[in-house]
Image (cartoon, rainbow, N blue to C red):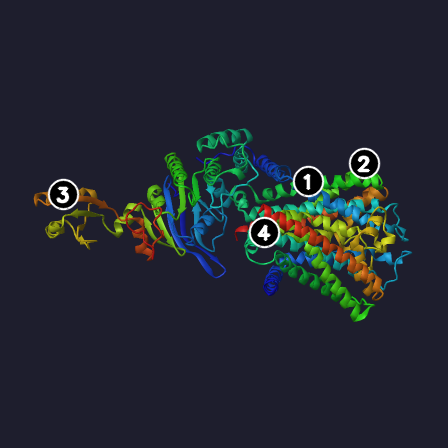
Amino acid sequence: MAKAIAVEGLERAFDEVLAVQGVDLEVGEGEIYGFLGPNGAGKTTTVRMLTTLLLPTGGRASVAGYDVVAEARRVRASIGVALQEAALDPLMTGRELIRLQATLQGLPGAEGKRRADDLLERVDLAGAADRRVGGYSGGMKRRLDLAAALVHEPRVLFLDEPTTGLDPVSRKTIWEEVRTLNDEGTTVFLTTQYLEEADQLADNVAIIDSGRIVAEGTPASLKAEIGHPHIRLQLEEGSIAAAEEICARIGPLLPPMDGKTVLVEVEHGAADIPRVVRALDEASIAVGSLELVHPSLDDVFVAKTGYHLEQDGDESDEGEGAVTE
Amino acid sequence: MEATVVIPAWRANLATIGALMSRAKNELLRVPGAAIPGVLAPTIFFLGLNGVFGALTQLRGFETGTYESFIVPISMLQGAGFTGAAAGVNLARDIEQGWLDRLLVSPAPRWVLLAGGVLSASARALIPASFVLAIALPLGAGWPGVDGLLVTYLMVAAMAAVAACWGSMLALRFKSQSAAPLMQAGMMAAILLTTAYAPLALLQPWLAEIAEINPVTEVVEAARQGFVGEVSWAGTWPGILALAGLLAVLGALALREMRRTGA
Amino acid sequence: MATNLRVVRALGMRSIRQTFRRPQLMAPIIVFPTLLLAIQTGGAGGAVDLPGFPPVQSFLQFMLAGAMMQSLMLAGNSGGIALAVDIEMGFTDRLFAAPISRYTIVLGRLAGTAALGLLSALWFFAIGLIFGTEIEGGIPGALLAIALVTVTAMAVGGLGAAIALRTGSASVVQGLFPLVLVVLFLSSAFFPVDLMIEPAKTIAEYNPLSLIVEGVREPIISGIDASDTANALLAIAGIVVLGLVLSARALRHRLRVG
């Protein structure tokens, strides 16, 4: 099966600055692909090249089997796009916008009308459909943008930072919609600056920094590459030394945070918990609390780029990686 | 799962142009008072020019009856220039706000995207033109006859299209609304550096030379026919030719800019 | 008092910097009137042959004053827009909260308008000279005309500022631009009043702008005339008073309404 998106050595220079330098990636059909990186990393530039809005200055790319430069029109007919600016006209109503999109895509009038009704229902905008977009909230505008991108049932959907600036509820709604779409077979290419979003949604993630891909893989494999999870044990003071000795037999110890915890790296994650519990139990060591801590994508990010992606950890649920530097 | 286009390309293109024209009218109908400057400006110019320069008809060589008759077609054409340039400003705003991306990412051909704005300007230009005419007739402008009126309206609609191509070209080139004065000034110069204020013989030599090479002079003369005399094919075809040429050139330039937006 | 002067100077410098930092806003104020000047002298230049036309060297010599008036009216309008933008942005709120006289805010803004007025006067004199126009009043005449233009720019700017203060909306002030053109058409800016057509003629006879136009024009086409100059100054004073009255009321209204 042809790849939904195939990119080879893609480059884009603006005057002398290389915004995107030598990007290679592949996205299979039915995948959700996450493009993760900070502002200015080259995410939007890459998406604009893949959606034929920008010409590459080097390299090649094909979307839905069509070359983005030579067969741009075929690419446009096969993709749906929801861009960062939520390109909406404040004077139009939601319904008018989707019907205009349907016309742009070459759908006949009646079909466009029917699909508009369905999509508005689907993204929960049926009630506001005949109000002007200018009065929509940020979340409503994103949902409308998403609905418009789907009107022609595209094979590949491009979402450029779909939940930036949205409240957590709206964000979850968009995530659910993306998952549903993916279940129906749509390939999704999404860019994001939120670790959790990439972690939750993407089958495969590429981390981009300063125009280059610095890491690529499934979220799990990336995290595993960086390190294993560890178990954090809270114990009584007197039993620390003994517990350390026991745990050291199960896995390497990590530097303790304070005098009451033991941190032991466990290769098999949760599967190793029974071992640890049993071993401590046999030694009659009472455990105050036990916590399994996973490496986060931020750890991956820091390892690959040298800095944290999220400055104040407002988005990630993971315990570590929240401190700015 | 690719959507199958069940209608032929030409029908899809026509529907797209229609939809874009329909969107363009929102500017007039949904923004209170937005239409007023565009409709009033040519009329104000007409009244002003007439009051100020009306005495020129006393000069030998001015063969028409009233100055009103002489300049009302100019004011109508100015309305066309203004409307077309405004279409360019709207496109610049659409570019700044990211709306154009939505159109560019669709499979619609580039010329179709351009045609929507241009044709809408053509249609809209008829409004200020009619307004000026309605004011001018009771004030002394001669009735041009149905044939004269048709020719004038044709010139107005086509001139608006020319202005819209000019404005769109600049909008796509500079991607900013700050190009607006250039759009307006360009059209103003094009329309007024002609036999706008006086017949060729009475223009200062330098302006007479410019007016002779300026293709818009033919448009002015053709539009003016019914108001100052008889309408004839000989008086009309040079105007049509001039407009066709301007549309071809400016349209091609605008299309080129549209195609180069991603470069 | 010293503080007020310092504030006027500071705001004045700011408004001048703002004006000249954005050429694309300045351009219409100079370019449009220049274009119109060229077109009108080229198209209607034959008017000098009309019986009753004042003795002039050329139509251009006649029109220079009108072009300068047009520029300064646009400059005044743009000064009003700039002040309205300041109000919309909340900048003026900061000024109102400071212990300075309210008028310094308006005066400071007018410095930019005056600079534009001065520039446009110099520009059109340059154009006139390049095309061989003689200034009948010589250097004193030119200086007088330039001074009148600059002061009138400020006076008109004051009106623009009053409207800005009253409405607080840049788009409203901008929308008055056509009105500016109308008022100018209905004056002696572009043609001798005696040769204008009714009803424009009568309106122009009573339009105070006509007095100012004549005050600027006389030094160019014939020489300095005390009564024309006095009339012009009277008309300017009238506009200044109107501007002050409207500004005062607008300021009171704004401070009440917030």
Q: Which mark is residue A277?
A: 3
Q: CA distance from mark 2 to mark 4?
A: 52 Å
As helix, strand or loop, the secondary structure at mark 1 comes to helix
Which residue is denoted by mark 2 in the rendering?
A: B146
As helix, strand or loop, the secondary structure at mark 2 comes to helix
Which residue is denoted by mark 1 in the rendering?
A: B124
**Up/down of C18 relative to B256, above or below:** below
Q: CA distance from mark 2 to mark 1?
A: 21 Å
Which residue is denoted by mark 4 in the rendering?
A: C87
Q: Is residue C129 visible?
A: no
Of residues C21 and C130, the one drawn nearer to the viewer in this rendering: C21
Comparing labels 4 and 3, the label whose residue is closer to the camera = 4
Q: Position of residue A114 (x, y in %)?
A: 50, 28
Q: Position of residue A138 (x, y in %)?
A: 47, 41
**Do the residues at discs 2 and 3 belong to one chain?**
no
The subunit letter for the residue under badge 1 reads B
